[in-house]
Image: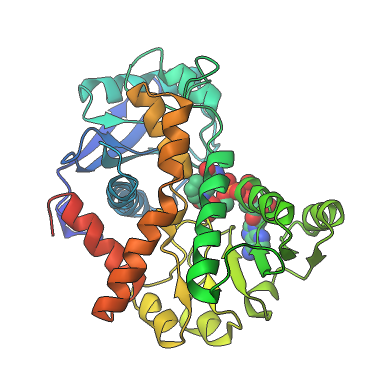
Amino acid sequence: MAPWQFPDFDDHEAVHFFADATSGLRAIIAVHSTHLGPAAGGCRFWHYAQDDAAITDALRLSRGMSYKNAMAGLPLGGGKGVILAPADRVKTPALLAAFGRAIESLGGRYVTAEDVGMGEADLVAIGRETRYVSGLPVAGADAAGGDPGPFTADGVFLGVKAAIRRGLGKDDAAGVHVAIQGVGSVGGGLARRLAAQGARLTLADVDAGRAERLAAELGAATVAADAILSIEADVLSPCALGAILTAETIGALRVPVVAGGANNQLATPEDGARLRDRGVLYAPDYVINAGGIINVGLEYLGAGSDEVARRVAAIPERLNAIWDEAEATATPPSAVADRMAQRLIGRG
Ligand code: NAD
């Protein structure tokens, strides 16, 4: 099937397929849009049972990056790399080098970074073959870059506070009950920031020990991972997996606000309307969780850490603009965010 016959094809500017016989590399780079600048987005290293699933991932994730970068105010378009991992999932230096050469051959139309299965050391290896790479070790004290997790947590924290103000009419998080699903890099960072402001926390993680250790440190409660989506609280903050908001889970929610860092929280676009119909205020995921891409994007563009902080601090403003338009047009915030992003990339 040609790429443009896939349901996730969205007038992508280009979809490149790379093969290198010596290293065994098979990779896809999807360039969704370069309207705002070079198509930036991480590279995933994953073993797919079917090649079609890899193409679908590249198409869907690259469009997501166009929206995320545009809404973060970055002069970057959206793209995504997918390396089809061999069955033994071994990532050799030769394979990374071949992928670096593939990126270089696009002459800067695509800029890569970390994603699932790719770490900083892999990007350093890719960076030996191409300059179109970000997510490298921090270059200096005031430079942008490094682990995106804390920056994502900063932005989600500010976004949760904006949602508390909007949805609960409270000026700070003190005494507000926040239920956090997943306490890894983003959820754990969020929990620490909220605890410092006196929020009441309930934590859940499939790694129950991890949730319990953090709860003991912060004086929080824990519940089983399968219970967190239906507990009574002021805010639910999904910080684990995607596609957790479905007709069924939305029906069982007992919170007035959903605001968290996980990517692709809505299982389908209709779930945005379901949340609205249940009177739940929703913070569109790719807007609230943009702190990490702001950090990585500005690293590539050569900006400093002060600029990262300034742009992360603008996340609440962006959420408020979305909620204002959602109210004024009786449209779910998720659909408003998509519309705003499409306008920004010249497709509105
Ligand atoms: P992480 O791996 O550090 O943490 C995820 C945590 O969720 C882990 O502790 C894991 O055990 C837990 N978890 C997994 N499934 C769960 C379930 N069903 N119920 C409860 N807990 C579960 O990952 P992270 O970097 O914190 O990312 C979390 C989410 O935020 C992901 O969706 C990721 O795509 C998204 N995100 C992360 C960043 C970033 O900068 N790290 C940026 C944007 C979006």
Q: How many marks?
A: 0
Q: Residue at x 81, y 66 (%)?
A: 221
Image location of residue 17, percent across then percent down: 25, 36
- Does 334 sit left or right of 259 as displayed? left
Residue nearest the viewer, comparing 249 with 273 = 273
Image location of residue 11, percent across then percent down: 14, 53
Image location of residue 181, percent across then percent down: 64, 63
Q: Residue furthest right?
A: 216
- Does 83 sit left or right of 169 as displayed? left
* Image vertical order of residue 189 relative to residue 222, above or below: above
Image location of residue 297, percent across then percent down: 37, 33
* Image vertical order of residue 212 relative to residue 131, above or below: below
Q: Residue at x 53, y 20 (%)?
A: 137
Quadrant where the N terminus is found in the figure: bottom left
Residue 84 in view of the camera: no
Residue nearest the viewer, comparing 329 with 205 = 329
Q: Residue at x 46, y 29 (%)?
A: 306
- Does 218 sit left or right of 44 as displayed? right
Residue nearest the viewer, comparing 20 with 126 = 126
Q: Residue furthest front?
A: 171
Residue 174 in view of the camera: yes
Q: Residue at x 51, y 40 (%)?
A: 87
- Does 155 sit left or right of 284 as displayed? right
* Image vertical order of residue 145 relative to residue 270, above or below: above
How are the colours assigned in the image? rainbow
Quadrant where the C terminus is found in the figure: bottom left
